[in-house]
Amino acid sequence: QTRNVAVIVGSLRKDSYNRKVAEALIAIAPPTLKLRIIEIADLPHFSQDWEANPPQTVVDFRNKIGENDAVLFLTPEYNRSIPGVLKNAVDIASRPYGQGILMGKPAAIASASIGATGGFGASHHLRQVLVNVNMPTLAQPEVYLGTIDKLLDDKGQLSDERTLKFLGKFLAAFEKWINIHLPA
Ligand code: FNR
């Protein structure tokens, strides 16, 4: 069974390493996992004032996530946590209360950093957030890609064999996880 997976990249940087990892995951995904990036750059800062009447960008963003069975998060680490833009996107998609489009969708997290710890702190802060959104989040394998800048080739792409093999295992585990939570 084919599953559609929304990919959310927590960096707005043009040459984002996390986006490169997302692109590598998209390239190696099995045909039964359709991954597509949903952009967060144009989202406004969340305000409860517009909960009853949200801006069109917010409505569109929620609808795009709603078209998917699961969500894959790629997060950088900013000061040992997730970037504000990513938290903002999750907050937006978690509302209205009790009806957030993320609720119940299986999730997985991967983080990448130029630092050696691979975004571990960000990954686990995000995990805490997703508990409240009631997203069953894949536990293993954990993906913290450290010194990510050293893993890119001269075209700036993630082509390191060992890393790609590991990411392949990660996607296989995520697919199983999705199928456990969303029986056919
Ligand atoms: C960082 N960076 C960083 N890295 C890390 O491993 N732990 C951290 O706590 C931080 N903190 C941090 C704060 C801020 C405000 C910035 C801008 C950066 C470095 C970060 O890993 C690096 O900029 C990555 O390139 C960000 O990911 P993208 O944008 O390449 O996907």
Image (cartoon, rainbow, N blue to C red):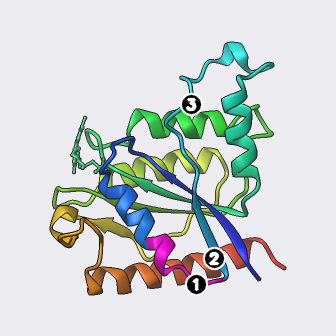
Q: Is residue 51 above or below residue 135?
A: above
In the visual, does 171 lie left or right of 60?
left
Q: Which residues are magenta?
A: 25-31
Give the quadrant of residue 6: bottom right
- Dot 1 crowding, Cα within 10 Å, few <14, some 14–19, many 20+: some
Cβ atoms under marks 2 and 1 closer than 8 Å: yes
Residue that label 1 marks: 30
Is 104 drawn above or below residue 125 in the view shown?
below
Q: CA distance from mark 2 to mark 1?
A: 6 Å
Mark identifier at residue 43: 3
Q: Is residue 171 above or below residue 54?
A: below
Query: What separation in Å lies between label 3 and label 2 (alpha carbons)?
Result: 26 Å
Q: Position of residue 87 (x, y in %)?
A: 49, 37
Q: Residue furthest right?
A: 184
Q: Amino acid at mark 1?
A: Pro
Q: Nearer the viewer, residue 138 or 150?
A: 150
**Residue at horizontal 79 percent and vertical 38 percent from the top:** 98
Question: Is residue 102 something that shows in the picture?
Answer: no
Q: At numbered mark 1, what does the secondary structure look like: helix, strand or loop?
A: loop
Instruction: Name the quarter where the N terminus is drawn.
Output: bottom right
Q: Earlier in the sequence, mark 3 or mark 2?
A: 2
Q: Position of residue 48 (x, y in %)?
A: 67, 18
Q: Residue at x 54, y 84 (%)?
A: 172
- Callout 3, which amino acid? Leu
Residue 16 placement (x, y as % from top left) = 32, 51
Q: Secondary structure at mark 3?
A: loop
Residue at horizontal 79%, vertical 19%?
Answer: 53
- Expressed as whole percent of the image width and height from the top left, the position of residue 150 reads 15, 68
Q: Earlier in the sequence, mark 1 or mark 3?
A: 1
Residue lying at 41% horizontally and 78% vertically, measured from the top left: 167
